[in-house]
Image: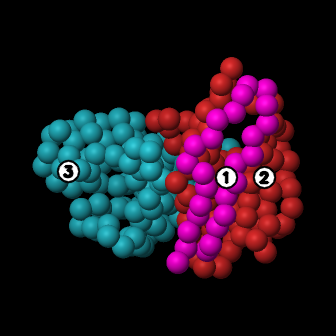
Chain colours: A cyan, B red
Amino acid sequence: GAVVSQHPSRVICKSGTSVKIECRSLDFQATTMFWYRQFPKQSLMLMATSNEGSKATYEQGVEKDKFLINHASLTLSTLTVTSAHPEDSSFYICSAGRGDYNEQFFGPGTRLTVL
Amino acid sequence: GQNIDQPTEMTATEGAIVQINCTYQTSGFNGLFWYQQHAGEAPTFLSYNVLDGLEEKGRFSSFLSRSKGYSYLLLKELQMKDSASYLCAGMDSNYQLIWGAGTKLIIKP
């Protein structure tokens, strides 16, 4: 159990376009979902934490108007990168937590390349 | 501030044992996690320690000393597929994971 899917796995887009990434918990209800970004050879950087039905909490330095997060249900959260630029190219990973917070289950990640 | 320190890279031989160390400083403490991450993939959970001592799970074991702010991941009978980055993460009082930069483990035949 505790499978998290992420879609798409890879996306290439032109500068200025918006990209939506979906994160789904397939066999459990995720009370909290986390969005991370990881640049090559660097650690995971938490972007935001979202709870179902409420606004996401963004980490310092992350623009909430650029990275729109919607957590509409206990099994789905979406991250939309608006007006993407080449510097937004990165590996975006979501994770879902259950009530006990003891473990985060990661999605397979989305490789975003902005040309 | 909060900080996780672990070596950048380690090399070991197939069949051998390797210990990856991690020291942590977090605001409050709700456990220490180890994750494995192969290149281009998302992390996968390996272990969770919240009490002092050694937790053994097959070829992998994880140790925690809360008084020293120290943990290690022990990998036995190394296989080539164990070549990956190993991420240490501490959970603070807000249940937020503070991530280390990861230790790249290179396994040689």
Residue at 22%, 42% (x, y): give it: A114
Question: Image check: A54 left or right of A96?
Answer: left
Q: Main secondary structure of the magenta part?
A: strand
Q: In terms of secondary structure, where does tag 1 sit?
A: strand
Q: Amino acid at mark 3?
A: Ala
What number is the disc on residue B62?
A: 2
Tell me the residue at 74%/49% (across/down). B73
Q: Indicate the quadrant containing the C terminus of chain B: top left, top right, bottom left or bottom right.
A: top right
Q: Which mark is residue B7?
A: none
Residue B10 lies, with reference to residue A43, above or below; the image says above
Q: Say whether residue A23 is magenta.
A: no
Going by the numbered disc 1, the residue's amino acid type is Trp
Chain letter for the residue marked with disc 2 in the picture: B
- Can you tell which of label 1 and label 3 is closer to the viewer? 1
Residue B34 badge: 1
In the picture of the structure, the residue carrying the numbered disc 3 is A84
Give the foreground label among 3 and 2: 2
Q: Which of the pair A30/A93 is nearer the observer?
A: A93
Q: Residues in magenta?
A: B1-26
